[in-house]
Amino acid sequence: MVAATIIKMLMVLELLVVSTTALLDPMDFLALQSIRKSLHDVPGSSFFTTWDFTSDPCNFQGVYCESDKVIALNLGDTRAGSPGLTGRIDPAIGKLTGLTEFTMVPGRVIGKIPQTVSQLSNLRFFAVSRNYLSGEIPVGFGELRNLRTLDLSYNQLTGSIPHPIVSLSSLTNLILCHNHLTGSLPSSFSSNTLTRVDLMHNNLTGFIQPDSLPPSVQYLSLGWNKFTGPVDGLLTRLNRLNYLDLSMNRFIGFIPCVLFTYPITHLQLQRNQFIGPVQPTQQVSISTVDLSYNRLSGPVSPMLSTVQNLYLNNNRFMGSVPAEYVDRLTDGTIQTLYLQHNYLTGFRINQTADIPLSSSLCLMYNCMVPPAQSACPLKAGIEKTRPTVQCSELRG
Ligand SMILES: *[C@@H]1O[C@H](CO)[C@@H](O)[C@H](O)[C@H]1NC(C)=O
Ligand SMILES: *[C@@H]1O[C@H](CO)[C@@H](O)[C@H](O)[C@H]1NC(C)=O
């Protein structure tokens, strides 16, 4: 008797459980159907095979629900080597009002990012890297108060970075690298949790205001754009940087010394128009420092001799290379020391001393005869020393 009652109760419970999980909001159900119709597996990918709309969509691969709403959509086969999806992102995505996360694996998805994303007021994470999305970044992203990560990297996006995103107070990761974006970096970002800004490889232009980015930024990559103007004010404020790449732009002015005290591992400032001396006030513990192809001058600081890979080539450095460099080269702690194409006048290395084969030293095209062990890249050319006329002019 008791057993039969318990079994009956269990059956009722089971029914309840089944009916609550199966009760996906009809709006979400229809939106998922539209999204499914606009996207397909690239041959070799088998993501949508589980998407059978006669069963509960909350059990589909990549669909996560909470009560009757879809809260996360992770589209595409995430296994390594999967060729991803093709087709387009359907504007019906905007109907998934409970969505907090939308991701798509690398693939061949084309077309625009629908403007309807502006309706996803709960969205926190949007990542569609490495597809073929084109057109402009929807301005509506700037209305998503909860947005933390926006990763649109490695697509074909054009137009400018929509200005309203500077007001997103929760924005943490802004990853727009490898697109065809133009215009300037909007200022000033109000989020005090902004940590990663990667805008590498676009066609962005203009000045970067000193207060355009908050001091919370730790990873800043603006390389391969057409930015100009000074950055000393900005860099002096960003004292939590652990990665900085400003290479291949048209930045001018001084490199602030305080930069060398930040917890940075890679400092890439090459191929700009930076001027002035580089005089860190303490021994630098950054592993790679690339300041090559600028207009830097003055002596080579002994404080940089603790850097493992140091590129100071193609500048206007003068004087004799400090003895610390010779010591660190012979004991193998320096792996790369590129000093070619400067106006250096001395490098006191003992002719019998051996530089380990694992280390590269290049001193070509300075105002001195380089030591025999010199290991230079092809680009350094074949001229061992600078014409004497250039060197005497400098001394005079
Ligand atoms: C930048 O613009 C130039 C000239 O219009 C173009 O050739 C180049 O491909 C563009 N680069 C990117 C990353 O969009
Ligand atoms: C050069 O190095 C050799 C071997 O390390 C040493 O015996 C010699 O004293 C050094 N000469 C100078 C001038 O430092």
Image: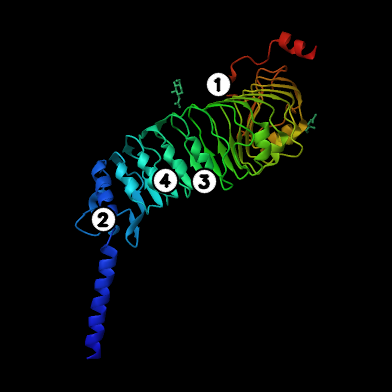
Note whether ligand 1 is within 8 Å of mark 4: no
Q: Which one is in front, 4 or 96?
A: 96
Classify mark 4: residues with Cα within 10 Å, few (<14), some (14-19) or many (20+).
many
Separation of marks 1 and 4 at Cα, in angstroms: 43 Å
Q: Circle 1 sits on which residue?
A: 378
Q: Which one is in front, 2 or 166?
A: 166
Q: What x and y, as percent, mark residue 132? A: 35, 34
Q: Is residue 177 left or right of residue 192?
A: left
Q: Circle 2 sits on which residue?
A: 26
**Given contact means CB atoms under 8 Å apart, are the residues at marks 2 and 4 in contact?**
no
- Amino acid of disc 1: Leu
**Given contact means CB atoms under 8 Å apart, are the residues at marks 2 and 3 in contact?**
no
- Amino acid of disc 2: Pro
Q: Circle 4 sits on which residue?
A: 126
**Which of the 4 quarters of the picture holds residue 14?**
bottom left
Q: Which mark is residue 171?
A: 3
Per the image, label 2 sits on a secondary structure element best described as: helix
Per the image, label 3 sits on a secondary structure element best described as: loop
Note whether ligand 1 is within 8 Å of mark 2: no
Q: Indicate which disc, 1 or 3, sits on the residue closer to the N terminus.
A: 3
Task: Tell me the mark number nearer the camera, choosing from 1 and 3.
Answer: 3
Q: What x and y, as percent, mark residue 150? A: 46, 43
**Given contact means CB atoms under 8 Å apart, are the residues at marks 1 and 3 in contact?**
no
Separation of marks 1 and 3 at Cα, in angstroms: 44 Å
Q: Indicate which disc, 3 or 4, sits on the residue closer to the N terminus.
A: 4
Q: Indicate which disc, 1 or 4, sits on the residue closer to the N terminus.
A: 4
Which residue ends up furthest to the left in the rendered image?
A: 54
Q: Which one is in front, 49 or 33?
A: 33
Q: What x and y, as percent, mark residue 126? A: 42, 45
